[in-house]
Image (cartoon, helix red, strand yellow):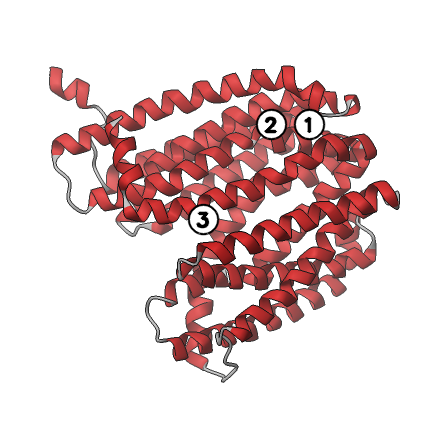
Amino acid sequence: MRILTKIKTSKVAKNTIIYTLFSFINKGIPFLLLPIITRYLSQEDYGTISIFNTYVQFLVLFVGLSLNSAISVNYFHLSKNEFKQYIGNSFYILFFTTLIVFLAIFIFKSIIYEKITLPYEWLYISIVVALMSIISEFNLTIWRVQQEAKPFAYYSTIMTLLNIVVSLVLIIVFNLHWLGRVWGIASITILFGFISIGFIIKRGYLDLTFNKSYIKDALKLGISILPHYFAQWMRTGVDIFLITSLVGLQYTGVYALGYQFGAIVGILAAAFNTAYASYQMEKLKSINQLEKIQLVKFAYQYFIGIFLFSIIFGFSMKLLFPIMIDSKFSSAIEYIIIIAISYSFQGMYFMVVNYIYFEKKNHLVSLATIVSTVIQIILSYFMIQEFGAIGAAYATLVGFILNFLIVWYMGSKVYPMPWGFWYEKNS
């Protein structure tokens, strides 16, 4: 197709695809672990691992405050001397937020422990894991904005592989069950956090000279994006805690595994969007009516294509899943197709959200995400009680469809496109 050909030849898209490809590979590598890990872990073990990951992702939001986004933006506006001061002051913020989060968890540890069922020590170890994860992201962000693809790829791939190897050794050789996987994640994340600090210092990007204006700027940019990311976390994270609380930890493990497979559709959609968004943004700078119609036609074709793909993928998993995964997790199959279809609507969302970003109306995206997520969580609570863990999957489907429709409507208002071109042509 003509649009796909143009995407392939776009210089911006080519640069973006490099990073997207390695990101996709690193997200895909852990799937190689599943055939082994599900044979050594119980449903409850896998549920505990899911709770740990969800808890760490939550801590990353409030420890990190999306500072990597602020760093990414300011690389293009500051000199190197100014930028390394910006990095240094971002570290000041990071260690301050870490202290605040530590104190908050210390005060409310009994309530948190009751809700997430992790041992007390992991409430605190997880803070360190979140901190080091953010520092690694600082390092990766610097490489990304400098278009240094090789170190970016080597670093992220080696970290992922070591994460898997250490986890397997601790689970299989030392028989540590869920604790082996959690220690595998934690130890490698912490190690690479220190390695990232070394890289940042060695390349001369850390100046700890205090600068009040940089701290204000980083906080302003980071906090402004936080509600959007928090709503995204709630979309997947709250279900894990609701299922654990309402129906039991073993169902959490099965649901999390099924969700992980269904979300492959989302990984593919995000990978394609990274390249398409660059092409689309370039196109919107100067576009005529015929080209608008071409974009709309492609969007409709993509809607149909990704929806059909999600259904085919979901049913294909019914054949492949028993071969790949231990039989005690077989009930996870029922979640896969629902989550896969849900993520097909996220793919459709990617097709329409860029019109809002192009007009710099980012607050509308946050509003849509928050509204659809709140509705999804309310539905999830009642549907889990009524139907069990499968209720969370159906609530997720409703939330993703709603988010797509709201953003599509908003996008059509801020940047009108000929979405009804066939009707206008015949009228």
Q: Amino acid at mark 3?
A: Tyr
SS label for mark 1: loop
Label 1 crowd (10 A; few <14 / some 14-19 / many >=20): many
Q: Which callout, 3 or 1, points to the residue nearer the camera?
A: 3
Residue at numbered disc 1: 389
Q: Is residue 129 left or right of residue 4?
A: right
Q: Quadrant of residue 95?
A: bottom right
Q: CA distance from mark 1 to mark 2?
A: 7 Å
Residue at numbered disc 3: 19
Q: Is residue 71 left or right of residue 192?
A: left
Q: Amino acid at mark 1?
A: Ala
Q: Residue furthest bottom?
A: 209
Label 2 crowd (10 A; few <14 / some 14-19 / many >=20): many
- Which circle marks residue 109 in the picture? none
Q: CA distance from mark 3 to mark 1?
A: 35 Å
Q: Is residue 38 left or right of residue 134?
A: right
